[in-house]
Image (cartoon, coloured by chain):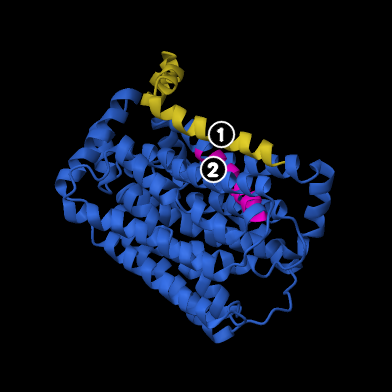
């Protein structure tokens, strides 16, 4: 749920970027912010010694983390084309199948939902379907149909389906890493290289080459802070999503974090007044879609994996340990929040402070050069939403720390 | 330090373990599909 709040909040700063920049540049700016934050937060929370030890233990996961980052970037670029060709109302529901794809892979490859009772099964599958359906209603109500040629429309639909397939499959490396006992903070540190490298390659390939991208980056300097801020919020949401994938599995964690659309909508509608020109029907659809999504999230949150299902998870974890020569008992302990590596980690290096200060410096520098666009915002509502989002960070972050020490 | 990762690299079985892992080819195939789609779209 905290993932949903922060992933949704990440949309707010990007709404301040109103000038005519290409979607590739906006994506690149945000991913660059993600890269900076992804390097800094894990270093601050666990230290480089811990992160390196974690990867030395599970060296095979480097390729998986890079692969997941590449899947994310290609999916993200596909959504740009999908929206261009068929419009958001058609494209969004199609790529939102990612949670169903994730649910399928979780069941097929990692024994998730096997051993679950019919009640829990109904809650997870029903809840996921409700979240997907609610998201479709929201997308339909808040977007405007676009006309497209039939050839373009077919490619657009394929692009949206491809994005859903890629994002849903991206959760395979996530789960692979976590049943091996990897720390999400270590995983995202490498994931971000695959993500930034591929996003940069996409921008260079599809946005006019190096000189054009470089010129656009210079032009975008006044708005870069907002993109970096969006990236920072996204990193916090993504970290919660990674911990959800680790501790409750992708079949439950991913649909729950996909409730970010409600939060994005709250920011758009209540702070930026985006629904003010919409019809009564559209507003009713938004309320109905949100309620369906909330009901779906509540259903999943009540479907805790029973002992019989957790036994099936353990079998999947043992299979990984067997293949890659890891200690199965150690992996099982980590999956219960007891990380032996945290007790063995070498002391922190002074360079870590330099990394942290450099990242803060980048944000401060961009902040100094940032321009606040002249957009009407409802400040009291914004403060309420900010307080709720920060509240999720504090409460859920504290719970994670108490139970797992961020392992 | 002799971690499982070090041992896998030392006896050159790391690449084999990854390449013979049927899970590995699922994201690879989906990624290739996505890149082909991108090429078709541009």
The answer, for residue A96, to whether it is visible in the render is yes
Are the residues at dot 1 and dot 2 in contact (C-beta closer than 8 Å)? yes
Residue A365 in sight: no
Q: Chain of mark 2?
A: A
x, y percent for residue A183: 39, 44
**Residue tagged by mark 2?**
A162
Q: Pick the residue in front: B21 or A286.
A: A286
Question: Seen in the image, is A302 located left or right of residue A273?
Answer: left
What tint does the image give chain B?
yellow
Question: Over which residues does the magenta segment extend?
Answer: A68-84
Q: Is residue A179 left or right of residue A270?
A: left
Chain letter for mark 1: B
Whether labels 1 and 2 share one chain: no
**SS for dot 1:** helix
- Residue at point 41%, 37% (across, down): A54
**SS category of the residue bearing label 2:** helix
Farthest residue toward the bottom?
Answer: A380
Rendered residue at 24%/40% (across/down): A313
Residue A64 screen position, x and y as percent: 47, 34
A141 lies above or below A25: below
Quarter of the image containing the N terminus of chain A? bottom left
Spatial distance from mark 1 to mark 2, Cα to Cα? 8 Å
Q: Main secondary structure of the magenta part?
A: helix
Figure disc tally: 2
For image coordinates 56% across by 34% down, the residue present is: B33
Q: Is residue A282 magenta?
A: no
Residue at image mark 1: B33
């Amino acid at each position: 749920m905290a993932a949903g709040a922060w992933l949704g909040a990440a949309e707010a700063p990007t709404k301040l970027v109103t000038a005519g920049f290409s979607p590739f540049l906006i994506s690149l700016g945000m991913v660059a912010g993600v890269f900076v934050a992804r390097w800094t937060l894990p270093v601050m929370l666990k230290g480089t010694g811990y992160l390196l030890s974690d990867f030395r233990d599970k060296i095979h996961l480097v390729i998986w983390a890079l692969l997941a980052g590449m899947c994310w970037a290609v999916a993200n670029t596909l959504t740009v084309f999908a929206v261009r060709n068929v419009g958001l109302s058609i494209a969004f529901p199609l790529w939102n199948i990612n949670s169903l794809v994730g649910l399928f892979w979780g069941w097929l490859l990692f024994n998730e939902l096997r051993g679950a009772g019919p009640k829990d099964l109904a809650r997870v599958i029903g809840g996921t379907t409700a979240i997907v359906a609610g998201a479709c209603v929201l997308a339909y109500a808040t977007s405007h149909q676009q006309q497209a040629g039939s050839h373009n429309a077919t490619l657009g639909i394929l692009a949206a389906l491809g994005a859903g397939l890629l994002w849903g499959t991206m959760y395979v490396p996530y789960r692979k890493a976590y049943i091996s006992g990897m720390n999400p903070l270590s995983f995202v540190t490498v994931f971000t290289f695959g993500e930034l490298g591929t996003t940069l390659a996409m921008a260079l390939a599809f946005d006019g080459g190096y000189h054009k991208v470089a010129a656009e980056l210079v032009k975008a300097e006044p708005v870069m802070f907002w993109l970096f801020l969006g990236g920072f919020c996204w990193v916090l949401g993504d970290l919660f999503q990674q911990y959800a994938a680790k501790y409750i599995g992708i079949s439950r964690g991913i649909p729950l974090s996909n409730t970010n659309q409600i939060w994005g909508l709250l920011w758009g509608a209540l702070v930026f007044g985006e629904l003010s020109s919409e019809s009564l029907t559209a507003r009713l659809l938004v309320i109905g879609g949100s309620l369906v999504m909330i009901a779906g999230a509540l259903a999943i949150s009540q479907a805790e994996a029973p002992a019989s299902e957790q036994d099936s998870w353990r079998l999947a974890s043992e299979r990984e340990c067997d293949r890659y020569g890891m200690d199965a008992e150690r992996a099982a302990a980590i999956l219960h929040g007891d990380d032996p590596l945290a007790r063995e980690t070498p002391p922190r290096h002074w360079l870590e402070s330099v990394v942290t200060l450099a990242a803060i410096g980048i944000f401060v520098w961009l902040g100094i050069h940032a321009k606040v666009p002249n957009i009407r915002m409802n400040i009291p509502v914004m403060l309420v939403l900010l307080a709720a989002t920060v509240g999720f960070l504090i409460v859920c972050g504290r719970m994670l720390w108490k139970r797992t020490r961020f392992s | 330090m002799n971690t499982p990762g070090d041992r896998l690299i030392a006896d050159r079985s790391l690449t084999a373990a990854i390449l013979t892992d049927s899970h590995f080819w699922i994201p690879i195939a989906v990624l290739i599909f996505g890149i082909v789609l991108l090429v078709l779209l541009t």
